[in-house]
Image: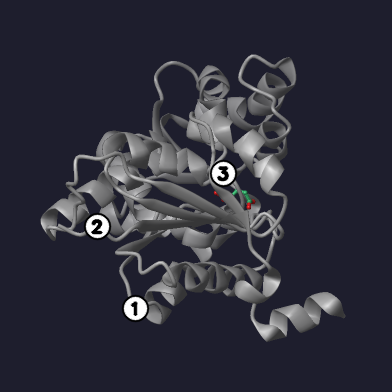
Amino acid sequence: MNTNPIAVFDSGLGGLSVVRHLRRLLPNEAVVYFGDTARVPYGTKSRQTVVRFALEDARFLLQFEPKLIVVACNTASALALHELEQALPVPVLGVVEPGARAAARLAEGGAVVVLGTEATSASGSYPAALHALVPDLEVVSQACPLFVPLVEEGRGCDDPIVQLVADTYLTPLRERGVRVAVLGCTHYPLLRAAIERSLGPDVHIVDSGRETSLAIQQLLAKHAGLCRTGRPGSMRCYVSDNPDRFRQVGSRFLNEDVDQVELVAPERYATPLQLATDIC
Ligand code: DGL
């Protein structure tokens, strides 16, 4: 048994949609979360910047001696997983592999569409992971950049604006024989019903966050790393900006109250180079 926490980071509060599954599946595990709310969004940034931010986020979490680090952010998983694996002394799990594995299993000869941020779509990480599993699979990458601000603004699946945007992005895909759609962004599970309506009833939806939580459960079980105290696991959150907003909006992602949130000063997570650049 290992009682050390599972550390999770994301560009902001979206990663709580992954923690939601993690807490349901592994209720005894302690979770420590870092949301880089000062520098969100990552989905419109360059690879170089996302890699630097992701390394800083993960290094901040090392002080809590986690048994593993989960990259809940699809953009950071797509652009920085390799660098994180090289740099960190603990196992690192991203959301791309588990999401791709589930999609490949469900595709059965049909096409897979991966919905994500601009950076995730441009990275080609999901298609690469899918083609490693099924070389001749048809994969379509569809960036849906308006989804993140719509969710952050509190708009849900019954909002006509959300449906209009979802239809604009997704109804053209109906002609492509899509069998599986991957929700390749932390925010998209909150728009799942609208996405399903746009794509039609025959498309399987894969939530990468849920698949990642299942992968974590399997990994910890395999290495005798599960926490079996029988007590509910604690949850502590750290953010780089605006803890009040994180508390308010975050509860929609987590599906429970977000209680313990602490603001982290830039010198505790950003490297001196980054601080100097910000000041200039
Ligand atoms: N967390 C990001 C992702 O899953 C979405 C928000 C952002 O662009 O930073 O890709």
Q: Which amino acid type corresponds to the residue marked 1 in the rendered image? A: Pro
Q: Which amino acid type corresponds to the residue marked 2 in the rendered image? A: Thr
Q: Quadrant of the N terminus?
A: bottom left
Kindly identify which residue carries mark 2.
3
How far apart are labels 2 and 1 at the CA level?
A: 18 Å
Image-quadrant location for residue 278: bottom right
Q: Is residue 120 visible?
A: yes
Depth check, front residue: 70 or 171: 70
Toward the right, the furthest residue is 280
How far apart are labels 3 and 2 at the CA level?
A: 25 Å
| Secondary element type, mark 1 | loop
- Write the residue at 54% across / 61% down: 123
Q: Is mark 2 within 8 Å of ligand 1?
A: no
Q: Is residue 183 visible?
A: no
Kindly identify which residue carries mark 1.
89
Q: Return the disc, 2 or 1, that comes first in the chain's sequence.
A: 2
Kindly identify which residue carries mark 3.
14
How far apart are labels 1 and 3 at the CA level?
A: 25 Å
Q: Which amino acid type corresponds to the residue marked 3 in the rendered image? A: Gly
Q: Is mark 3 within 8 Å of ligand 1?
A: yes
Image-quadrant location for residue 188: top right
